[in-house]
Image (tube, rainbow, N blue to C red):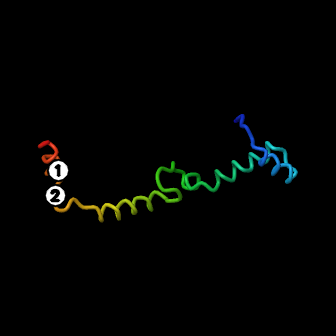
Amino acid sequence: MQVIVDISEKIVEQAESRGLRIETYVKQIVDQAAESDPAHRYGWTRFGTPGKAPSEAAESIRQIASRNTLGGLKIKDLIHEGHKY
């Protein structure tokens, strides 16, 4: 796939200092970014907290849910309360 991108002078200078063509250097940068992305490693799309595997994210959700209570109320009571207004 080909993509046309405006490259900053800083990137051009870095490529030249390494003796690489700009296309080769930018491809290396993109490939390295893709390999270091957890979504790439685990084969899932990342939403929310970067760097967490799905099982870790699920455990975090369970921990948060255990700390957040309705103070003894039932959801049905909250729905009924909302209908009063």
Residue type at the position of mark 1? Leu
Residue, x 31% and y 61% (percent of image)? 65
Task: Label 1: state its secondary structure.
Answer: helix
Q: Is residue 70 left or right of residue 25?
A: left
Q: Position of residue 46 (x, y in %)?
A: 51, 50
Mark 1 and mark 2 in contact? Answer it, CB < 8 Å. yes
Q: Is residue 67 left or right of residue 35?
A: left
Q: Position of residue 30 (x, y in %)?
A: 69, 48
Q: Is residue 20 left or right of residue 61?
A: right
Assess disc 1: are there few (<14), some (14-19) or many (≥20) residues with their C-alpha within 10 Å of its C-alpha. Answer: few
Q: Position of residue 82 (x, y in %)?
A: 16, 45
Residue type at the position of mark 2? Leu
Q: Nearer the viewer, residue 61 or 10?
A: 10
Q: Which residue is mark 2?
A: 73
Q: Earlier in the sequence, mark 1 or mark 2?
A: 2
Q: Nearer the viewer, residue 11 or 2?
A: 11
Residue, x 19% and y 62% (percent of image)? 71
Assess disc 2: are there few (<14), some (14-19) or many (≥20) residues with their C-alpha within 10 Å of its C-alpha. Answer: few
CA gap between label 1 and label 2 equals 7 Å
Q: Is residue 40 left or right of residue 69?
A: right
Q: Which numbered marker is on residue 69?
A: none
Quadrant of residue 66 within the rendered picture: bottom left
Task: Label 2: state its secondary structure.
Answer: loop
Q: Would you place residue 28 above or below residue 56 in this image?
A: above
Q: Would you place residue 8 above or below residue 77 in this image?
A: above
* Placement of the N terminus among the 4 image quadrants: top right
Residue, x 14% and y 42% (percent of image)? 85
Number of numbered discs on residues: 2
Q: Which numbered marker is on residue 78?
A: 1
